[in-house]
Amino acid sequence: MINKIVKSTTEAVADIFDGAVIMISGFGNAGSPIELIHALIDQGAKDLTIVSNNTGSGEVGLAALIAHKRVKKMICSFPRTANSTVFPDLYTKGEIELELVPQGTLAERIRAGGAGIPAFYTPTSVNTPLAEGKECRTFDQTTCVIEYGIKADFSLIKCEAADRYGNLIYNKTARNFGPIMCTAANNTIVQTRRIVELGDIDPECVVTPGIFIKRLVEVSHPADEAKLVSENRRYPWS
Amino acid sequence: MELENNKKGWNRNEMAQKVALDIPDGAYVNLGIGLPELVADFVPEGREVIYHTENGLLGMGPVPEPGQEDPELINAGKKKITTIKGACFFHHADSFTMIRGQHIDICVLGTLQVSETGDLANWSTGKPGSVPAVGGAMDLVSGVKTILVITNHCSKDGKPKIVKTCTYPLTGKAVVNCIYTDLAIIDVCDNSLFVRELAPGISFDYLQEKTGAKLNQYE
């Protein structure tokens, strides 16, 4: 029998190892798997490379993981937002690495990684500092820069509903990087607001097919990151 | 036309209104963060425009009524929004397929600097110690057919934002089609700047004085 459901977030992240490359879904407050990230903080893995669009806000979720010095390198498009101080402080002190990637190139590199495409060419970033030192080629009079697919050891994903096969649906703009990150990791770990029976998700409406999913855990009342930040909450909870 | 109170220039809403007037019926439009977001409030009657937000929505609607907000329904600026009837959600690779695959018609962006040849610099001042953040700006300027810039004519310290050559790191080269400021509307054509409209109380000479590149008048 196929059953990808595990009982706790602790169990879900237990095998994440030091030095792992981890993709984390989310765009701003929407779609970030905060409970899985907090379980990862408790678990203790370090020297991580994190692929995520932002660097978290306040001192919860991804920002808390960074604040606990577990992250060696961030691969992201937008490492500063309102309420984001943890990453900028460490970066300014030279204590964390940054690979800055245009957002569409980041999405395409993840998609390519998941699809077995090692590299591709794109005009995005040509004539800018982000293309410096990269191989260029011209197609139909358009100069393009080479970009490489990204693969991860783990992806941490938040979704709205899942069945035991790992078929997923998402909620509104919390979908963002989730579906592509599910495809690009050896081990995709999902927190879902609801677990539903097989067949409850219309096959026409499945967004992420279960084949991409390794493990699922139900988190029925996920925290609202913006609310935690506005209340100045910090993880671990004091 | 008589000017009220010797009015000089356009305010933010008027600037946004000028941009909205140039967006045709049926356009798919991406609005940048900040001033560009105002454009959505001024779509002329009778036109249907679909707004794209890079984080996965076509059909962005107005700001939600109090109590109707959903923390998982936000725009690229991370502000809470609504959907219109007929809206759809999609993941990030599809969202940027729309941008990079030239499916979005118009993008409205803010800026730090624009050059007379349409180079755009809007993501980094390049200062040592600053944290660079690019987001979707480079994808937008390389993939969207028409790039409109909406910006104050001068920076907060009074320096021209429209310059001969950008001194800040570029977002893209020769990408801007038109610039809407508090003082004028300026087209970028054949590597030169042409003044299409002056704001109330603004003369061509005054505009030239506030601009770091040569301005031309349409014949």
Image (cartoon, coloured by chain):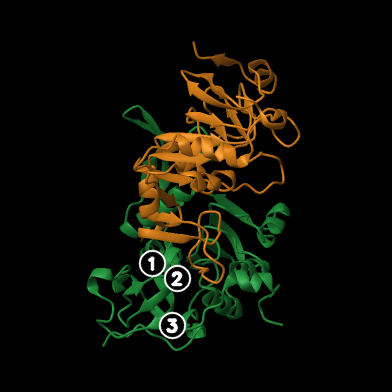
**SS category of the residue bearing label 1:** helix
The residue where tag 2 is placed is: A157
**SS category of the residue bearing label 3:** strand
The residue where tag 3 is placed is: A217
Q: Position of residue B172 (x, y in %)?
A: 50, 34
- Mark 1 or 3 closer to N-term? 1
Q: Amino acid at mark 3?
A: Val
Corner quadrant of residue A74: bottom right
Camera-nearest residue between B125 and B116: B116
Q: Are marks 1 and 3 on the same chain?
A: yes
In the rendered image, the vertical position of residue A31 relative to residue B178, given as above or below? below
Furthest-top residue in view? B219
Q: Position of residue B14 (x, y in %)?
A: 58, 38
Q: Are marks 1 and 2 on the same chain?
A: yes
The chain in orange: B
Q: Amino acid at mark 1?
A: Cys
Crowd rating for badge 3 (residues with CA inside 10 Å; few <14, some 14–19, many 20+): many
Q: Chain of mark 3?
A: A
Instruction: Mark 1 and mark 2 in contact? Answer it, CB < 8 Å.
Output: yes
